[in-house]
Amino acid sequence: MNDHTERFGSSLRDRWMLDPAITYLNHGTVGAPPREVLDFQRTLSDEIERNPAKFLLRGFADHAAVGGPSRMRDAISHVAAFVGTAPDDLVFVDNITTGVNAVLRSFPLRHGDEIAVTTLGYGGVANAASYAARTSGATLRTIDMPSPGEPPHVFVEAIERGLSAATRILVVDHLTSATALILPVADIARACHARGVLVLADGAHVPGNIALDIESLGVDWYSANLHKWAWAPRSCGVLWTSPAQQPYLRPVVTSWGFDNGIAAEFDLPGTRDPSPFLSAPFAIGLMNEYGLEAIRDYNHGLAWWSGQMLADAWGTTFAPPESMVGSMATVPLPPSLGSNQRDADRLRGSLERAGIEAPVLVARSGLAVRVSAQIYCDREDVERLAQTVNELPAA
Ligand SMILES: Cc1ncc(COP(=O)(O)O)c(C=O)c1O
């Protein structure tokens, strides 16, 4: 693996709240913030509760009444440096689903236009695209994507082939959910722009998982979660919008920031708990203390090793090239364990009873399990998964 093996691994597990009796290989699904981040958030909540009216109404978000920089804007400037954007073009959203909804509901779609999604996209996001299309007289196009194992350019070509003259927006994952593949988003954006198609990137799994410099990708919008891999408390997402697309952008919820620019519009969606957003800079700072590159290297090394080791143990094939793997690996399960959703649910239940938390997915070629590597995991955790699966009865 790499030099960080000794420093990272199960000895760090008590820095998380995770139940020590559970082998937790599912960091990606909803994230898991370290104890220190939760302690910071609790301290912040205590500060809020000492004078909630003052904290939430005066000085926390951009608003005519505030004047000067707000705590939300101060927090976003730390996050902007982390994800590679200008602070003025970045806003907090509750989660990536909210960010995607804001873009798709704001975009001036016309009757006959198309929104394109891909077969590798996340279901909730595809639903948001479907709703935006339905309410504007547009249609939804779903582009068929290659199977894991193909090199990056094949994914770009599939998208190029899948667009039509009516496509206005492509919604595409930077790091896919079920298949855990890093897609060549910059190349995809170039190909789309050459055809007049705007690109909304879904970076749900990206910040903290792989290196990220949003502005260099050349997309038009980028929404992401910080509560998955950037160690922020739930729920905490961001939405970046290129300056050209900002004039008509609105949050899903309209409130006091109306017509005062995107910072005010998104920072003031009515009363809500700001502590996840205001804790994000602390979470990023903590990652930097551990060493951001060291974390990513360790997690990638463990995910890549897990892909090969599990496939060997189960007699299946882990196909993606290493350049398309981040901190997660989706590995095909032995065909004898079944192939449909019922089999997947049964299998997940068996893993849960064995004390292992990992998602079991129905992939195109059968069942697969997704392993998330985080610095509290080590090879023994993944070996336990390998062995547990090998001891399960056939379907
Ligand atoms: C690719 C992708 N997009 C969107 C989401 C939705 O994230 P959230 O529920 O935090 O909005 C997920 C969740 O796992 C995801 O994997």
Image (tube, rainbow, N blue to C red):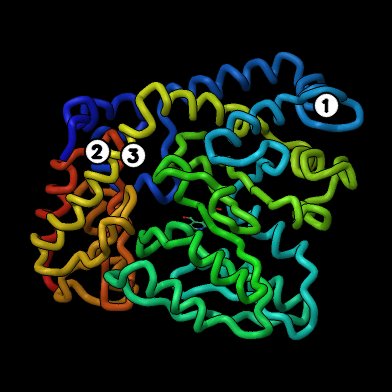
Distance CA(mark 1)–CA(mark 3): 38 Å
The three-letter amino acid code for the residue at tag 1 is: Leu
The quadrant in which residue 278 appears is: top right
Residue at image mark 1: 57
For the image, the number of numbered tags is 3
**For residue 205, side relative to residue 18 (left or right):** right
Residue drawn at the location 60% of the way across and 53% of the way down: 222
Residue at image mark 3: 296
The three-letter amino acid code for the residue at tag 2 is: Cys
Residue drawn at the location 36% of the way across and 29% of the way down: 16
- How would you rate the neighbour count of disc 1 (Cα within 10 Å): few for under 14, some for 14-19, many for 20 or more? some
Vertical position of residue 257 compared to residue 345: above or below? above
In the rendered image, which quarter contains the C terminus? bottom left
Distance CA(mark 3)–CA(mark 2): 13 Å
Vertical position of residue 3 compared to residue 157: above or below? above
Label 3 or label 2, whichever comes before in sequence order? 3
**For residue 8, side relative to residue 160 (left or right):** left
Distance CA(mark 2)–CA(mark 1): 42 Å
Label 1 or label 3, whichever comes before in sequence order? 1
Relative depth, front residue between 32 and 215: 215
Q: Secondary structure at mark 2?
A: loop
Relative depth, front residue between 203 and 168: 168
Label 2 or label 1, whichever comes before in sequence order? 1
Whether label 3 touches label 2, CB < 8 Å: no
Q: Secondary structure at mark 3?
A: helix
Residue drawn at the location 35% of the way across and 34% of the way down: 293
Residue drawn at the location 54% of the way across and 40% of the way down: 83
**For residue 381, side relative to residue 92 (left or right):** left
Residue at image mark 2: 377
Q: Secondary structure at mark 1?
A: helix
Residue 244's disc is none
